Amino acid sequence: MVDTYGVDEERFYYATETVFGTTPTNPSMLSVPCDVIDPGFDPSNLKLRGAGSYDLQAIKKGLRKPSLKVGYVLPSAAPIELLQWAKMDLDKSLSCQVIYYKGTFASATDIISLLFKGIRISKVSVECSIEDVVKAVMELEGQDLETGTAKITGATYTDHGGAVAFHESYVKKDTTVLDRVTDWKFDIINNPRRVPVIRTSNGHLAKYIPFGHRELSGELTFEFESKAEMDEALVDTEFTLEFGLSGTNKAVFTYCKWDNITHSKWLEDLICAKARFVAKGPVAISAS
């Protein structure tokens, strides 16, 4: 009998699909250093009631809804390799595999494989604080889920390692580096929706998962020594925010405005300013 699996015996991998909902042949599976891997599955059962019974009369499967939540440290080896797929202009789908295993991964035994297909990134939050590393939490929605007891045949598995420390990041507003920031965060919410069609073959699977209306926002925490953000909010100033993600990697939000600004006490009664922003977009995630 196999013992239960621990967090040191699970991994997350992903590959780009060329055909929606189909894992490529001999795929190159890539990973990020995860601290959260939460797979989920909802069959959306149709629960039917009727006259003459206190109990359900039938339970039929509905629209299949696989989901996945992944928390990870941006790997210094490839900081934006996974993050870039949150952009709408890169609208390809992903195959994502969660693997539970015993022994060393190279010669793993007792494998449980959860292969999510037709994955789109629903939401990602990226944040950085002083004396910490840049972290991301990603929520994904998919078309289908396939279970197995082995790795993908013909696949190569590559682990992106390392981490991006706070001192390898920066925040720039327009052309000026903001050197008062102690914490930053940005959110990309794509609001994808599963779209089924009436069909007898795979009718319980979404045929499409298009992105919906996108929401771009975030928050910066400043050491309080300036009223600049309050002034900009009062005069309705528009600006661009650039977040450094190590080296030349960056995320750039355009047509931003301060959305909410509050002052509060911070370490040992120092005052900080928390400034939320909202962006009209677009957002660019690139390595140049």
Image (spheres, grey):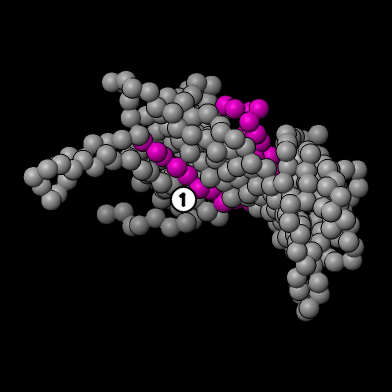
Instruction: In the displayed orientation, state which residue is furthest to the bottom.
Output: 268
* Relative to 137, 40 lies left or right: left
The mark tally for this picture is: 1
State the image coordinates of residue 229 (x, y, percent, origin top left).
84, 56
Q: Secondary structure at mark 1?
A: strand
Q: Quadrant of the C terminus?
A: top right
Vertically, is 219 above or below 144? Answer: below
Compare residues 83 and 274 and report the one nearer the observer. Answer: 274
* Relative to 171, 39 lies left or right: left
Q: Is residue 86 magenta?
A: yes
Instruction: In the displayed orientation, state which residue is furthest to the left.
Output: 52
In which quarter of the view is residue 80 placed? top right
Name the residue: 74% across, 52% down: 259
Instruction: Bin the neighbour count of mark 1 within 10 Å (Cα to Cα): few under 14, some 14-19, many 20 and up.
Output: few
In which quarter of the view is residue 214 placed? top right
Q: Is residue 131 visible?
A: yes
Q: Is residue 213 magenta?
A: no
Q: Quadrant of the N terminus?
A: bottom left
Name the residue: 10% across, 47% down: 53
Name the residue: 85% across, 66% down: 224
The residue to which callout 1 is attached is: 38
What residue type is disc 1 on? Asp
State the image coordinates of residue 20 (x, y, percent, origin top left).
49, 24
Compare residues 134 and 150 and report the one nearer the observer. Answer: 134
Span shown in magenta: 64-92
Vertically, is 22 above or below 241? Answer: above
Q: Is residue 30 visible?
A: no
